Amino acid sequence: MRLDVEDVSVEVAGARLVDEVTLDAPAGTFVGLVGPNGSGKSTLLRCAYRARRPDAGVVRVGGEDVHGMTPRAAARMLAALPQESSTEFDFTVTEVVAMARLPHRDRSAARDRAICEHALERAGVAHLAARGFLSLSGGEKQRVLIARALAQEPRVLVLDEPTNHLDIAHQLDVLRQVRASGPTVLAALHDLNLAAAHCDRLHVLQAGRVVASGHPDEVLTPALLAEVFGVRAHRVRHPGTGTLQFLFDPLAS
């Protein structure tokens, strides 16, 4: 299912955090948002997953305004992993993931359990099923929340820094599992090497505006990385996959 952001702006205390952004994530693609801290990525994603209504513009999923949907209808189509997620109640891992099935509560309980168990396995946290969520490490919590998002069976998945707290092996595995799960993905990523390796398309944000869009090979040029991120980038190819990767140096002062 396609996701479209159309002329979205967000203003807070007189500062325009997102400035007339238009971008898209075609059905079935993995689309990345990259940009320096404060470029508006998280604010834009909050508009996409209904945590904030934009001051101007519209976000559409499958052609329908997400902010015009009922919460349940939206949750059947779209799932999100915010950058910061917390709970004060020590639910078990199984209970946390089972919450994802609430929008589908007219389905069979047996099917819901099977979907949750499969999501736990895909996220590599099935062995933690009986543990209390608050007892987990930061990386374990992140994988449980990814399992919950997968268990929701969304058509569109919005991820804000999904590799936070994860070691290298789990970063690679989580992005592979998310991609294999099939939904359209819009994800904010800080690691440009991960973005280049996993995204079909990138949108680069700077000061709340999209300054470049396209395939990672086309977008992530040394000139753009110097201008937007303030680094000197050396483009190399992964010896096994041929994927574009980068080595970085600070720009000379």
Image (spheres, rainbow, N blue to C red):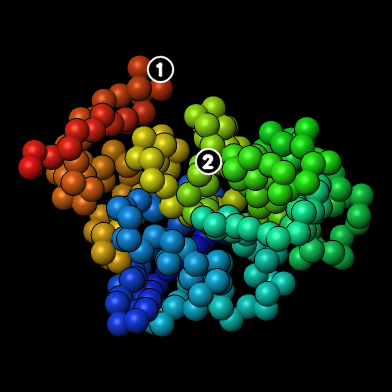
Categorize mark 2 by other alpha carbons within 10 Å: few (<14), some (14-19), many (20+). some
Name the residue furthest left. 253
Q: Amino acid at mark 1?
A: Gly
Q: Residue at x 29, y 77 (%)?
A: 15
Point out the image quarter for the N terminus: bottom right
Against 205, is 57 above or below? below
Name the side, left or right, on which 188 lies relative to 106.
left
Q: Identify which residue, 146 or 3, lies in the foreground.
A: 146
Q: Earlier in the sequence, mark 1 or mark 2?
A: 2
Disc 1 is placed on an element classified as: loop
| Spatial CA span between label 1 and label 2 | 26 Å
Q: Position of residue 186 (x, y in %)?
A: 48, 54
Q: Identify which residue, 246 or 221, lies in the foreground.
A: 246
Q: Residue at x 39, y 53 (%)?
A: 33
Q: Position of residue 195 (x, y in %)?
A: 40, 41
Answer with the quarter of the image where residue 103 lies: bottom right
Answer with the quarter of the image where residue 250 lies: top left
Q: Position of residue 95 (x, y in %)?
A: 81, 52
Closer to the camera: disc 1 or disc 2? 2
Q: Residue at x 35, y 22 (%)?
A: 238
Against 82, is 167 above or below? above
Against 67, is 79 above or below? above
Point out the image quarter for the C terminus: top left
Q: Can see residue 115?
A: no
Q: Amino acid at mark 2?
A: His
Name the residue furthest top. 239
Q: Which residue is mark 2?
A: 165
Q: Are marks 1 and 2 in contact (CB under 8 Å)?
A: no
Q: Which residue is mark 1?
A: 240
User: Which labelled disc corresponds to residue 108?
Assistant: none
